[in-house]
Image: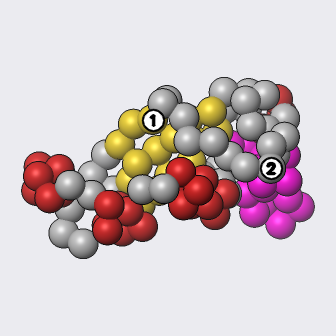
Amino acid sequence: MPKSKLEALLMKNIDKINSGTTDDKGKVNNAEMLLVEVIPATKNFYFDDKNLYFHYSPYEITAFAAGDITIPISWEELKTTLNPEFKKRMSINY
């Protein structure tokens, strides 16, 4: 996958997991605390049967108040880039 596409997915999904920062309506607001214009793909990632997750420490991409940030990218969003053997092993049916 091109780096720019992965970075776009990270930007799109930054507010999908609550880091503890919300607006006055309770909506997750990690994007408003960004310190970078582009979220770089990091080697600090993990995955489960639903998503690929990228983890960022405080100050890495956001203000310290946002805390640790974990950004999920669903297998659905990555379906055209997944290796068939990996999809089978993880029981991904997209």
Q: Quadrant of the C terminus?
A: bottom left
- Amino acid beneath label 2: Glu
Residue drawn at (75%, 63%) of the image: 27
Say which element carries label 2: loop
- Nearer-the-camera pick, 66 or 10: 10
Q: Residue at x 31, y 67 (%)?
A: 79
Measured Cα–Cα span from mark 1 to mark 2: 20 Å
Check disc 1: other Cα within 10 Å, few if <14, some if 14-19, many if 20+: some
Left or right of 51, for residue 60:
right
Q: Could you say where residue 47 lies in the image, as x and y percent from the top left?
A: 35, 42
Above or below, 21 relative to 78 = above
Q: Is residue 79 visible?
A: yes
Place of residue 57 in the rendered image (x, y in percent of width and height, measured from the top left): 66, 27
User: Which residue is the extreme one toward the right?
Assistant: 24
Residue hosting label 2: 37
Q: Position of residue 20 (x, y in %)?
A: 73, 43
- Mark 1 lies on a secondary structure that is strand
Residue under the point 68% across and 46% down = 39
| Horizontal side, residue 23 vs residue 43: left or right | right
What number is the disc on residue 45?
Answer: 1
Asked if labels 2 and 1 touch by Cβ distance under 8 angstroms, the answer is no
Q: Which residues are magenta?
A: 19-33
Residue at the farthest front position: 2
Image coordinates of residue 13 in percent, x first then y, are 60, 59
- Left of 37 or right of it: where is 44? left
Mark count: 2
